Amino acid sequence: MDAPASHRPFLYLDKGTPAEYGAALKHTIAQGWLEIHESGTYVKILPAGNDLFA
């Protein structure tokens, strides 16, 4: 499986599963911390998530 570069640390270094990655992404979006660009190719950190990712 060839994962995009943004997924690799989670999937290969932390040994997370694709399902866990998807659940975490959905959670961060629901919390208002991230949004997915309409193209689906990248995420944007929202103001509510700034402190979490600093």
Image (cartoon, rainbow, N blue to C red):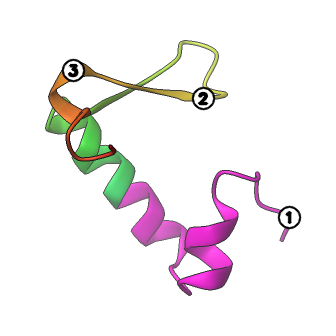
Q: Is residue 28 above or below residue 29?
A: below
21 horizontally vs 11: left or right: left
Residue 26, horizontal then vertical, whole percent:
31, 45
Q: Is residue 14 above or below residue 9?
A: below
In the image, 51 versus 12, the foreground residue is 51
SS label for mark 2:
loop
For mark 3, what is the residue? 47
Distance Cα–Cα, label 3 vs label 2? 16 Å
**In contact (CB < 8 Å): disc 1 and disc 2:** no
Distance Cα–Cα, label 3 vs label 1? 31 Å
Distance Cα–Cα, label 1 vs label 2? 17 Å
Q: Residues within 10 Å of mark 3 (few under 14, many from 20)?
A: few
The magenta stretch spans which residues? 1-23
In the image, 49 versus 15, the foreground residue is 49
Residue 42, horizontal then vertical, whole percent:
60, 29
SS label for mark 3:
helix
Q: Nearer the viewer, mark 1 or mark 2?
A: 2
Q: Image quadrant for the C terminus?
A: top left
SS label for mark 1:
loop
Residue 1, horizontal then vertical, whole percent:
83, 71
Q: Earlier in the sequence, mark 1 or mark 2?
A: 1
Q: Quadrant of residue 20?
A: bottom left
Number of numbered discs: 3
Which amino acid is tagged 3? Pro
Identified at 52% across, 17% down, the residue is: 37
45 horizontally vs 49: left or right: right
Q: Which mark is residue 42?
A: 2
For mark 1, what is the residue? 2
Residue 50, horizontal then vertical, whole percent:
25, 32
Q: Nearer the viewer, mark 3 or mark 1?
A: 3
